[in-house]
Image (cartoon, rainbow, N blue to C red):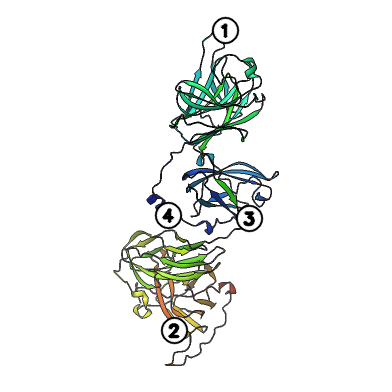
Amino acid sequence: MYRMRMVIVVLAAGLLLAALSASASASAGLAGFQYQREVAIQENAGETLRDYQVLVELSGSDFPEEAQADGDDIRFADADGVNLGYWVEEFDAGSRRAKMWVAVPLIPANGEVGVTMWYGNPGAESESDGEAVFEFFDDFDTNTLSNYDINLDTVPASGWKPPVDPTYDPTNRRININNGDNIETTISPKNTDFLNVYAEAIFHLDGAYPEGGTGKISIRWQDANNWYQGGKSGARYSKTGGGGGACSYITPTIYKIFAGNDACLAAPASNSYINLGTEHKIGFGVAGNTLKLFLNDDLILQTTDGSITSPGRIVFSGMQYRGWIDNIRVRQYSASEPTVTLTPPAPATHTALSITKSPSLNSIRQFSETVITLSIKNSGTTDVTDIEITDRVHPSFDLTSGDFPNPKRYDLIQPGETRDLQYTISAKESGTFTLDPATVTYADADGNIQETESESHVLRVVPSTSGSTAGASHHPSSISTASVHLHGEKTDVVMGEDILLKLSAVNKITKPTMTLQVILIPPSGMSVTSADFVDSGAGLYTSTYVIEPGVGRDIEVGIRSNQVGDFVVNGEVIYYFGDDKENAEEHLLSLPITVRASPTPKHTPTPTPTPEPSPGFGSAFAVAGLLFVALLFKRRGVD
């Protein structure tokens, strides 16, 4: 496959926009990658280079031995953390050699730019992609001859074999060339014009007529009268040939056609040839007035000429050729290419702050409430500073209580730490609504400001037939038929003091069997010391009870304050009678609690007894926070 890339000149405003939209800096790291190398790239020609293909070579002690044996876990990112296109030309763990090409967005004239190489991830799969790197790339994995203009330069002569079009070899994945007895077959990528460019391909000469043939690459091919060309011939080609122009039987050579006249620009003291039946990479580069010819990546000829100064096409050709062509690559070229310097390998550092947003209930009734929890976690290996969290309440909901981040700021979150925020919203209307993502911005280890968002959530609101009850669930006394009551024996405490919450649930004798679920939503700054809640997940505690008519149940929850501040213990209650799940009621109650550093001078706090831990509650539930709720329901049938 191949890819043609349009070179876009990016204005300063565009570059600024791209920088602002980057999701993470290089120091933010790639999750799962254990090592990094900083790569410094120095521009040497005094020209600003954009989307330039840079070769990173590694050998000996520079070879990343912690990488996968085939280099599948190699990645490159720029200083803004944006992943860069790359292509692995060679990666040999046995010989400790690697050649990788990276597309670098911008290298300032006479300046230096850095990229980061990441590796050391056993589970990573290769993202090597030549089409994402080069101006033109074709390894003939598929038949792409339709992407080329093909020409057969024929000479009608008695007894000569007829020309044969190039054909695709699906077994070996290459292009077969057979001129017959004709002069030349050329293939040229369609719709391409280049000025400063390097082109290369693998040529294989089978021989015959007369003995060899010539592999050639032409650059700045403006028309049949103006182009530069470099190439080399097969064994004994020139010794059996005859006639032709000034350069026809010199090998290797750099020559040109200018204004219809051919001239040799560079040639060796004596001819040398390509051995038949072997593969050879021919590369030819033109930058400004500098021309260079390479054979198997070795520079063999170099010269200067300024005759042809306009962009032109790339042409790959075989003269009196029997053989094949493969692995065509075209890239930008500078007369003095950038210098690449690598720092020693180092363990990867990761700055990674994530944010999740989730409602405690995804489906509620109109005028009922749900608690929104925002959890911010530093899962990296470095401190995160200057944190700012923002969120938005959907216009179909009211903010009724809690710690709404508008914005919420933290100075520091260390590796492994989490901050939780909770607030309550009430549905004003029924329908299906998508809650906007919450956003967190922060400074990474290098001081770069990063931004990340949570996922959005869909919240379903079922119509209510009893009219607005907004605010009714905020205080137990507002529910005249309440059978569940939440009470804190103390709500103004000193940090470290235990608090006992008690929920009393009673099913009236006039009601059917009641099934009751309570959901506890712990706030940060408090830890659970005992509870009847034996299930937990996503920072919530939950338990379900079946209460017969006329039976009551007391549920006690012990919490301990670990931070100073004002907290709200929230909880959700869902209940139904008999088998009538469709008419289940959902309610939320909030209980404010104040935690002080020391007792207030106005009164001496009364010690609160610490309840015995309930069976089934393990130390694994010592999570920051607690809450609970209470409920209630509306009158249905007989009281």
Q: Which residue is mark 1?
A: 159
Determine which of the numbered discs, if any, sits on residue 542 in the image.
none
Residue at screen point 54% across, 42% down: 337
Inspect the image, locate mark 4, and give the three-letter code of the amino acid beneath it. Ser
Q: Earlier in the sequence, mark 2 or mark 4?
A: 4
Instruction: Give the residue type at disc 3.
Output: Pro
Q: Are marks 2 and 1 in contact (CB under 8 Å)?
A: no
Secondary structure found at label 2: loop
User: Disc 2 marks which residue?
Assistant: 491
- Residue ID for mark 4: 21
For the C terminus, the image quarter is bottom left
Tell me the element at label 4: helix
Q: Amino acid at mark 1?
A: Gly
Question: Is residue 220 shown above or below 493?
Answer: above
The residue that mark 3 highlights is 345
| Depicted 622 relative to depicted 222: above or below | below
Rounded to the nearest whole Å, what is the CA distance between mark 1 and mark 3? 65 Å
Identify residue type, mark 2.
Thr
- In x, y percent, where is residue 433? 36, 59
Q: CA distance from mark 1 to mark 4?
A: 67 Å
Mark-to-mark CA distance, 2 and 1: 108 Å
How many angstroms separate mark 3 from mark 4 (CA)? 29 Å
Between the residue at mark 3 and the residue at mark 2, the CA separation in whole angstroms equals 55 Å
Which comes sooner in the sequence, label 1 or label 3?
1
Task: Name the N-terminal-most of marks 2 and 1.
Answer: 1
Label 4: few (<14), some or many (≥20) within 10 Å?
Answer: few
